[in-house]
Image: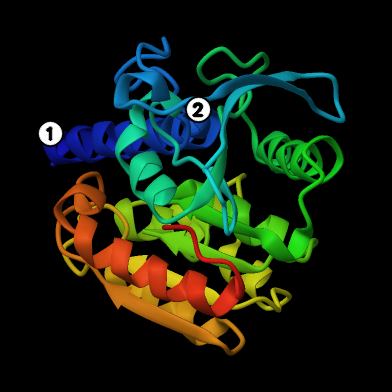
Amino acid sequence: MRWMAAMLGWAVAVYAGLVLYLYAFQERFIYFPDLPSRQVTATPADIGLAFEAVRLGTADGETLAGWYIPAPAARGTLLYLNGNGGNIGHRLDPIAVFHRLGLNILIIDYRGYGASTGKPGEEGTYLDALAAWDYLIQEKRHLPQRIVLFGESLGGSIAAWLAARQTPAGLVLYASFTSVPELAQALYPIFPASLLARYRYDTRAALASVRCPLLILHSPEDEIIPFSHGQALLAAAREPKQLVELRGGHNDALLLSREVYSHAVGAFLQEVLPGTVAE
């Protein structure tokens, strides 16, 4: 009995220690600026695209690094908001796809990622997205109704937050989740993860205030963010909205389903960006 009591005591202590670790260091489970590397080792020039290296100031004094990639006879502009791993140099393939669809592209590294200053955090990433939006409106003189927001994974929540406060032409969410507490509970079911979460990133709540057309891209094979999250976001959003199923895992669906999402985004652009269509 003493042995069993000792083992139970050790198990409780280990469990409590893990709970405290999850609470105290949860940012380590959300932000991965060094995966696979923080260094930006590739640029659009590597895929034959001209670009401008930009430096953006945020409202709280951070400096963000990014690229503006112009398209000839552009039909509009895409603001690309990354996922939580890697940097802008790891997004060249989707950049090429969006460029072929006739879009100028602005892509930034959040604070603490790539060559951007600062440390990532929820409120900070929202300010980063707002700085990128302001750059397109104030510096590039683009009209809000010619800008489409694209949010990848964590960036989907950030894009939804921005779309709830601005007036873009459309919003595209790729492999996004409903909220951090709900996703954390799904990923760590043996812990009270939803209660421990200090980060919210409540995509579903943001969508309640989004009035522009919505396109959701998600794969039923996604092993990190369940397909049910994409379905829940669709249910929460206003019309017009649609969900397009991809194939592949969380980190390779954009590669494996390039033709599918390219066609889906192209059709979406025809609806939300009427007028001149780039060749």
Left or right of residue 60, residue 188 in this image: left
Label total for image: 2
- Give the vertical position of 178 relative to 126 (above or below): below
Towards the viewer: 28 or 94: 94
Quarter of the image with the N terminus in it: top left
- Give the vertical position of 27 relative to 141 (above or below): above
Residue 87 appears in view: no
**SS type, badge 2:** loop
Name which residue type carries label 1.
Trp
Left or right of residue 93, residue 184 in this image: right
- Residue 152 in percent (x, y) is at 44, 50
**SS type, badge 1:** helix
Packing grade of label 1 (10 A; few <14, some 14-19, many >=20) is: few
- Residue 109 in percent (x, y) is at 56, 27
Figure quadrant of residue 164: bottom right
Towards the viewer: 73 or 13: 73
Name which residue type carries label 2.
Phe
Towards the viewer: 117 or 13: 117
Q: Mark 2 points at which residue?
A: 25
Q: Residue at x 70, y 35 (%)?
A: 128
In the image as oriented, which residue stretches furthest toward the bottom?
239
- Give the vertical position of 49 relative to 237 (above or below): above
Quarter of the image with the C terminus in it: bottom left
Q: Residue at x 44, y 79 (%)?
A: 232
Residue 169 appears in view: yes
Residue mark closest to the camera, 1 vs 2: 2
Mark toward the start of the polypeptide (1 vs 2): 1
Q: Check contact, mark 1 vs mark 2: CB within 8 A.
A: no
- Give the vertical position of 181 relative to 126 (above or below): below
Per the rendering, the mark at residue 3 is 1
